[in-house]
Image: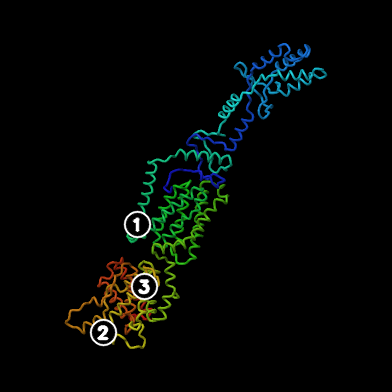
């Protein structure tokens, strides 16, 4: 069960440990350390083997035989032989003839029960049938009537002490019941083990007995379950509130929220399952993967906050909760710094090394503060940190899965998309080199601007590189591809020209989807003209149809308008770069006027009302564009003389 619990320690706390690293363990109840099953069986077997045998005296058969012996002519012996026979039998009966027991347990002490009293005796103090017969043989050496006398002795010999199986088994049963199943016990308040004390086999047995006993006493209850559910719900609600108040762009996307909560829940489930195998296994869980995965797709602050929530929940599965939170927070914050700019695969390895160093720093400092030098000398405590750090390399395949399942886009994918040798960009450079150069210049302008006003520079660069791929269908109809050729627009009507120009947006979307370009990049194709009109052809059409009612929608791009800071900046960069190619004179005043006119037109057309961009941002973008265009066209600033 993955819901958090307040159990301080479990049997898994002892697994793999040679030294008790936690605080002194004080018994919260009486502790009874059970003997091992093999030992109990061995002791029970020894009790059965060594238990005394019980016998009872019965003289009925003896008396009957002696009476028979006295009858005339009963034996066929002469008077002397009869007297000898009687003397031998009396001698044996005087000592007692004991019944031989199963297994020939003659080495045991026995209890003889007579008249309700039991007296302990030695088995060898009595005659058995065999020893009585040997006695007869010895006494009758040289007697001429030996055989007849022995024959009659055997005939009239009777057992006087009988084995009592019921009494014997009753005694064994009582001994077994009196045998303790526990080898030791501790009272409530006793210290079971001191901090940093070695966990010997005896101590391990005591700890396991106590922890099993505690777990047994912690019975399931609805009250307990309700509290755990409420705790988990409260912590997750805090995460939801953070997204609702401070990350509205994430909160408004179901896929984003689902992914973040899925990361937290899966981390909790994995932690709960792994914690059952011991503390060392629990510390091997790559908790630092949480900020890595969240930062890849979102921002550092969201990554850190999500990590804090995950650690808060998972800490309930830890034995030393403060130590766990302390060390994980240090490692988590270090992870955030290491993945601030995650654009190359090697940075994942660097991140793993950074996390390991922070883990070691936190672990060593914590134990030095607590004076636990003994713990620091044991290599086994460092292994989980190494495993946890190296498992951060799992981020790469997990990022790939998240992109496929949730439709996200990472910096790794954006870097691959911006590769000029990618199939679509290579085709663009070969078929329409003019448009390709235009896209490069737009990418440079947009990336520089977004860097200064804040935004995803890789995303806007990828969007800029692909925003005009639709021009590959009719390249000759676009100015940048008309090198020394006749303008084909002169041979067709303005409305037809506008239709061809506008169609490059739709065709670009279709081509991008055919090449499986991510939706986040396709958004730049959709929005880079927004709902503006094809001005030159619209004006030409108006001149030809003066006084008529004109449907301007035939000359208007389908939209939508930009809805993010990146798509807004790309629209500005595209318009400014394209217009700059038609300047007759490249000087500071011309460029100044061009940039202001193009961007102000977009603002006037309400193209940025859905984008989170401010007038201050737009002013900054203008300054950057002016500066970059002057550099591109080698404009020299004229200073007053």
Q: Quadrant of residue 427?
A: bottom left
CA separation in Å, label 2 and label 3 = 34 Å
Element class at badge 1: helix
Residue 629: percent from left, percent from top: 36, 78
Q: Is residue 104 above or below residue 499?
A: above
Element class at badge 2: loop
Q: Which residue bears the numbered disc 1? A: 243
Q: Nearer the viewer, residue 127 or 345?
A: 127
Q: Nearer the viewer, residue 508 or 360?
A: 508
Of the residues tagged 2 and 3, which is closer to the observer? 2
In the drawing, what numbered circle is on residue 304? none
Local packing at callout 1 (Cα closer than 10 Å; few below 14, some 14-19, many 20+) is some
**Mark sitting earlier along the chain (2/1):** 1
Judge from the rendering whether residue 43 lies leftward or rightward of residue 26; answer left or right: right
In the drawing, what numbered circle is on residue 493? 2
Q: Are marks 2 and 3 in contact (CB under 8 Å)?
A: no
Judge from the rendering whether residue 519 lies leftward or rightward of residue 110; answer left or right: left
Residue 565: percent from left, percent from top: 33, 67
Residue 421: percent from left, percent from top: 45, 75
Residue occupying image coordinates x 32% and y 68%? 617
Q: Nearer the viewer, residue 212 or 166?
A: 166
Q: Which residue bears the numbered disc 3? A: 446
Instruction: Give the quarter of the figure containing the C terminus.
Output: bottom left
CA separation in Å, label 3 and label 1 = 28 Å
- The number of numbered badges drawn on the structure is 3
């Amino acid at each position: 069960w993955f819901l958090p619990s307040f159990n301080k320690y479990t049997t898994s706390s002892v697994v793999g440990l040679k030294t008790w690293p936690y605080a002194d363990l004080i018994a919260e109840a009486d502790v009874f350390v059970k003997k091992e099953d093999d030992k109990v069986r061995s002791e029970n077997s020894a009790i059965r083997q060594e238990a005394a045998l019980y016998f009872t005296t019965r003289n009925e058969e003896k008396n009957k035989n002696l009476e028979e012996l006295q009858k005339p002519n009963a034996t066929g012996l002469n008077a002397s032989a009869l007297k000898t026979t009687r003397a031998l039998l009396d001698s044996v009966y005087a000592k007692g003839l004991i019944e031989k027991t199963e297994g020939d347990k003659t080495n045991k002490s026995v209890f003889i029960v007579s008249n309700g009293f039991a007296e302990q005796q030695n088995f060898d103090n009595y005659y058995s049938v065999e020893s009585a017969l040997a006695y007869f043989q010895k006494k009758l050496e040289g007697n001429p009537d030996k055989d007849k006398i022995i024959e009659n002795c055997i005939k009239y010999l009777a057992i006087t002490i009988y084995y009592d199986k019921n009494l014997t088994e009753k005694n064994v049963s009582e001994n077994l019941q009196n045998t303790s199943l526990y080898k030791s016990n501790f009272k409530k308040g006793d210290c079971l083990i001191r901090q940093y004390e070695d966990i010997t086999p005896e101590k391990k047995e005591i700890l396991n007995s106590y922890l099993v006993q505690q777990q047994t006493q912690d019975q399931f209850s609805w009250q307990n379950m309700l509290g755990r559910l409420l705790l988990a719900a409260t912590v997750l609600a805090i995460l939801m509130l953070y997204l609702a108040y401070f990350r509205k762009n994430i909160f408004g996307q179901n896929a984003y929220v689902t992914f973040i909560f899925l990361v937290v829940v899966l981390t909790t489930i994995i932690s709960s399952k792994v914690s059952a195998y011991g503390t060392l296994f629990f510390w091997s869980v790559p908790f630092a993967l949480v900020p890595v995965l969240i930062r890849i797709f979102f921002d550092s602050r969201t990554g850190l906050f999500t990590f804090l929530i995950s650690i808060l929940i998972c800490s309930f599965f830890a034995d030393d909760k403060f130590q766990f939170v302390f060390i994980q927070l240090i490692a988590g914050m270090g992870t955030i710094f290491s993945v601030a700019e995650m654009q190359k695969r090697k940075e994942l390895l660097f991140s793993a090394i950074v996390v390991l160093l922070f883990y070691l720093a936190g672990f060593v400092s914590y134990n030095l503060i607590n004076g636990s030098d003994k713990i620091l000398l044991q290599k086994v405590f460092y292994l989980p940190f190494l495993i946890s750090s190296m498992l951060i390399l799992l981020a790469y395949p997990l990022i790939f899965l998240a992109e496929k399942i949730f439709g996200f886009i990472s910096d790794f994918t954006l870097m691959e998309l911006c590769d000029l040798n990618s199939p679509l960009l290579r085709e663009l450079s070969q078929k329409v080199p003019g448009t390709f150069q235009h896209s490069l210049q737009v990418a440079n302008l947009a990336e520089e601007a977004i860097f200064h006003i804040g935004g995803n520079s890789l995303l806007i660069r990828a969007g800029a590189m692909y925003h005009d791929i639709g021009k590959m269908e009719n390249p000759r109809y676009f100015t940048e591809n008309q090198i020394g050729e006749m303008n084909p627009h002169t041979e067709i009507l303005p409305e037809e020209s506008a239709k061809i120009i506008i169609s490059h947006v739709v065709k670009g979307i279709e081509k991008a989807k055919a090449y499986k370009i991510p939706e986040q990049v396709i958004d730049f194709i959709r929005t880079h003209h927004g709902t503006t009109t094809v001005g030159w052809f619209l004006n030409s059409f108006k001149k030809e149809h003066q006084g008529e009612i004109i449907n301007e929608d035939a000359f208007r791009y389908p939209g939508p308008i930009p809805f993010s800071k990146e798509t807004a900046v790309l629209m500005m960069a595209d318009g400014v770069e394209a217009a700059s190619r038609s300047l007759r004179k490249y000087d500071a005043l011309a460029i100044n006027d061009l940039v202001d006119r193009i961007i102000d037109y977009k603002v006037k057309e309400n193209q940025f009302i859905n984008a989170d961009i401010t007038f201050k941002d737009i002013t900054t973008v203008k300054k950057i564009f002016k500066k970059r265009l002057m550099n591109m066209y080698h404009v020299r600033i004229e200073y007053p003389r």
